[in-house]
Image (cartoon, rainbow, N blue to C red):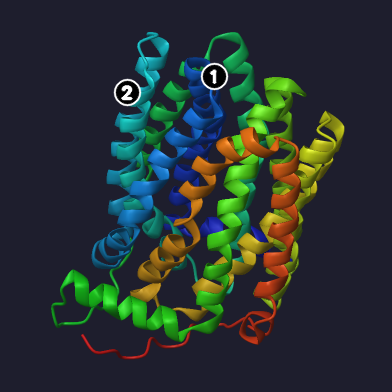
Amino acid sequence: MTRANAVRPLRERNFAWYFGSRFVNTLGNMMANIALTFAVLDITDSAAALGQVLAAHTIPMVLLLLWGGVISDRFPRELVIRVSNVASAITQGMIAFLVLTGSAELWMLIALSVVHGAVSAISFPAMASLLPQLVPRDQLQPANALMSLTRNGLTVLGPTLGALLVVTVGAGWALAIDAATRLVSALLLIPVKVPRAAKDTEHKSTIAELREGWSFFISTTWLWAVVLGFGFLNMIHNGALFVLGPVVAEDTIGRRGWGYVLSAEALGLLAMAVVLLRVPLKRPLFWGMLAIALASVPMVVLGVDPHLVALVCAAFVAGAGIEVFSMGWNLAMQENIDDRMLSRAYSYDALGSFVAMPIGQLARGPLGAAFGNSRVPVVSGIAYAAICLLVLTSRSVRDLPRRSTPDPVPETAG
């Protein structure tokens, strides 16, 4: 793939504005993630409390994801994203205000996280399924790679900058910046005008549309096999790395060191995105599932040797693997699923992938206290790698090829 072809998607007007919108939003969001983590720890000094705040975001997101998929297939996806960005700006702004004024309490952060999770449930299927409407099919891989470069390039700086803000002026300012960027992101989406695809003339109820999406989901083996695997993988990853990780970091490499670890993962993501910008990815799910198994490495290192250099190297390797899977999964979805079903397919994907995350978030604190903060990450890492290999026993996952056009969605009874 030549350099000109690699940046060709930016010549598409809609994609260029969408690219700018996500650029601004990601800059604030990546700082906010680490800022919220340490804001909760400052207030509570409790891994269990951090798990509660994270779960408060995840649970409503999981419960409302299917509804979000229906909304995103019914209405213009760019409009859904704009409205969601404004709502997210309000909730993040309120959290920032509470933290900055010193009036934040755990129940307040939990309540606002519930609202923010509900908004995320609406926006996620729309963001995941909008890209194929912005570029021609033959530009999907470079378009996905450019989005990854933006996201990953900013996450190299975002966590470190967020950690620096936390240790200098406090977590509230990073959260305030995130709120502002969400408003700017909504404004940048205003010029995006996507022609609406032809819809069925028959009006269907929400239940009928959900049932149609479910029929497609369970009839597509590679789809449900990967989603089932990620139900367990995300539970393990979020609990072992995002709940226990900061707790272990507090006693070993420090808060700034944990920011370096997160930035190293982003560097791995960035480096692999550069590679995938020019190298076509064939058999996307085969290579994707092999690569994502590398995400188990930081968990094992966290339990065995929680030193900065070892964790930074492990996080870089994991980031590269995550990026390969992310590209492979997006291509599999975007090239094999018709547009009128894509948001619902992504919502069922997200529901299955995220449904067990609150279990991991809530359980890792008590598990770490009961069995030790070193033993739990090691066992988690081993289980993570084993599940990745188990998913690859499905031939439909191993052999799924690249396609230039998606297969038509089969008709189902309403």
N-term mark: 2 or 1: 1
Q: In this picture, is 16 found above or below 103?
A: below
Q: Residue at x 58, y 67 (%)?
A: 229
Q: Quadrant of residue 350?
A: bottom left
Q: Nearer the viewer, residue 300 or 4?
A: 300
What amino acid is at disc 2? Met
Which quarter of the image is occupied by the C terminus? bottom left
Q: Residue furthest left?
A: 203
The residue lying at 51 percent from left, 18 percent from top is: 171
**Does 400 sit left or right of 295 as displayed?**
left
Relative to 194, does residue 376 appear above or below in the rendering? above
Local crowd size for mark 1, using a 10 Å CA cut-off: few (<14), some (14–19), many (≥20): few
Q: Is residue 256 above or below residue 406?
A: above
Judging from the image, what secondary structure is the residue with disc 2 in? helix
Q: Which mark is residue 358?
A: none
* Helix, strand or loop for disc 1: loop
Counting from the top left corner in percent of width and height, residue 67 is at 27, 61
Task: Inspect the image, locate mark 1, and give the three-letter code of the amino acid beneath it.
Answer: Asp
Q: Which residue is mark 1?
A: 45
Residue 94: assigned label: 2
Camera-nearest residue between 266 and 199: 266
Work out whether residue 134 or residue 309 is closer to the camera in this orientation and state it. Answer: 309
Alpha carbon distance from label 2 to label 1: 22 Å
* Vertical comparison of 370 with 381: above or below: above
Quarter in which the N terminus is drawn: bottom right
Q: Is residue 57 left or right of residue 266?
A: left
